Amino acid sequence: MGAIVETGAKVEEGAVVAAGALVRAGMVVAKGTLVAGVPAAFVRNLTATETSDIAKAGAEMAGAVPAHTTELGKTFSQIGEEKMAYPFQQKHVKNLDDEFGLIEPQLEKIW
């Protein structure tokens, strides 16, 4: 999130670059390490649990790619049609005034 990795820097698989860090050209962030700062500097080695959690998170994100790709390919019309296909949406869109008393009952109270 907001980290900058300059051209010529290398971040190995399994390494972590902290948010806002600047990894300078020529720097190698080794597998299993955490770097932070401007310029980035070694902070510490990652624990076995952290390394495992990072691998799991990466696999989960990769698994979400097909679904996101499908969603990004939809038009606004398709998205609108899908939203209206859900009973929850239909109920709230069609009966908004009655269910929440937003328009008619308020006007009656004012007048």
Image: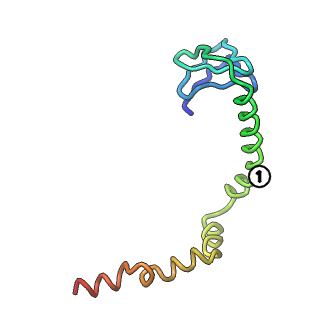
Inspect the image, locate mark 1, and give the three-letter code of the amino acid beneath it. Answer: Pro
- Residue 3 point in image, percent of width and height: 57, 27
Seen as rendered, the residue at the extreme top is 26
Residue at 45 percent of width and 81 percent of height:
99
Q: Which of the pair 87/79 is nearer the observer? A: 87
Q: In the image, what residue occupies the spot 25% across and 85% down?
A: 109
Q: How many marks?
A: 1
Q: Secondary structure at mark 1?
A: helix
Write down the residue under mark 1.
Answer: 66
The relative height of residue 100 versus residue 54 in the rendered view (above or below) is below
Quarter holding the C terminus is: bottom left
Q: Residue 44, image x and y in percent?
A: 64, 17
Residue for point 42% across, 81% down: 97
Q: Which image quarter is the N terminus in?
A: top right
Residue 108 appears left or right of 22: left
Among the 4 quarters of the image, the one containing residue 18: top right
| Crowding at mark 1 (Cα within 10 Å: few <14, some 14-19, many 20+) | few
In the rendered image, the vertical position of residue 63 relative to residue 95, given as above or below: above
Residue 26 x %, y %: 67, 12
Q: Could you say which quadrant of the image residue 54 lies in?
A: top right
Q: How is the image coloured?
A: rainbow
